[in-house]
Image (cartoon, rainbow, N blue to C red):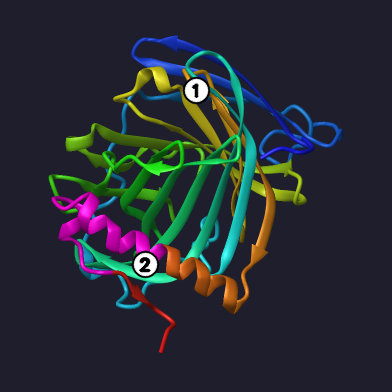
Amino acid sequence: MKNRMCTRVAMLIALVTPLLIVTAGTAGAGEGDESNGHEKDGHAPITVTVPADCTQAAAFTPKDFPRRARVDNKWFPLRPGTNFVMSGTVVDEQGVTHRHQIVTTVTDLTKTINGVRSIIVFDRDLDNGELQESELAFMAQDEDNRVWNVGEYPEEYVDGKLDGAPSTWIAGIARATAGVGMLPKPRVGTAAYLQGVAPKVDFRDCAQVVQTDQKVCVPVRCYHHVLVTEEWAPLEPDGGHQLKYYAPGVGNIQVGAIGGDNPEVLQLTALTRLNGKDLAAIRGQVLAQDRRGYRVSPNVYGRTPVAKCAGCS
């Protein structure tokens, strides 16, 4: 997310077998550093030892989830109708930098996956203004306020035409397992946690909390008490790592790249609440993609129940 950059991410990566030592910094609006462990604006180094892999943070048990889907975790709230625009750049395989944008809408639709009613989040990934991927992501929160990733249906597009959804994974199908999208009480020093695994599509994502209580400025505004996590895919070592910045009551506001073949840098450039008409239009697009999924991915997505509208009469 870019336009203007009030916070910059500067990163240095060094590989030490079998651990990864990562040092990262954020540049803010020009104020000096404060004491360690408190809010920082300016260069606030992140030094953390990141393991090469991760484990499940908790058992995924359907009885631990409420019957009505809700996600109100402080760091990862999903309020239906919220629309995020993340803008920035990504570098392709040839080293060319592209304008990159991800538009995310929290819908009022749900889908039951692996026995858990989950909220459908609609992501559209644009490269130089052209749609590259349209994804339905499924998120659920357990009674301990732990947010789970329970599946993804990402349609890929080439020259504006649907080119399939080969990376689809759904927890409980083809040995795929749900993972944690956000901890209930994230703290520095907690173990790296699994964000999801799907052996059939070589998907395995990890995350770890690396910093808290930061001040980060993005085009929308400056945020305090920001949480920073690091994410990586052990099965894709050339993909590098990402730093993700989460503002309390908002969610992800910034993404930074640490190495990797296709580094991506994003900032929150727009945050709005959709009116009833606009949300209904998004709902229609998501329901159409949901129906299409039964044809595009019959062996995985085709085994899920249809999406339902949580707030519709």
Instruction: Name the residue at 69% across, 53% down.
Output: 270
Asked if 22 appears above or below 249 in the picture, the reply is: above
- Could you tell me which secondary element the residue under label 2 belongs to? helix
* Residue 231 belongs to magenta span: no
Find numbered disc 1 in the image and state the secondary structure of the residue it sits on: loop
Examine the rendering and report whether any part of residue 145 can be seen: no
Please tell me whether mark 2 or mark 1 is closer to you in this view. Answer: 2
Q: Amino acid at mark 1?
A: Asn
Q: Which mark is residue 33?
A: none
Q: Amino acid at mark 2?
A: Leu
Tell me which numbered mark, 2 or 1, is placed earlier along the sequence.
1
Q: Quadrant of residue 228?
A: top right
* Residue furthest bottom in the image: 313
Q: Which residues are magenta?
A: 286-306
Vertically, is 82 above or below 3? below
Badge 1 crowding class, 10 Å Cα cut-off, few under 14, some 14 to 19, many 20 or more, is some
Residue 78 x, y percent position in the rendering: 50, 64
* Relative height, residue 88 to residue 95 (above, below): below
**Which residue in the protein does label 2 denote?**
287
160 relative position to 75: left or right: left
Q: Residue at x 64, y 46 (%)?
A: 226
**Do residues under tags 2 and 1 come within 8 Å of each other at their CB atoms?**
no
Q: Residue at 84% across / 37% down in the picture?
A: 29
Where residue 285 appears, as percent x and y from the top left, is 44, 63
Which image quadrant for residue 20?
Answer: top left
- Residue 64: quarter of image: bottom left
**Residue drawn at point x = 36 percent, y = 64 percent:** 288
Residue that mark 1 sits on = 262
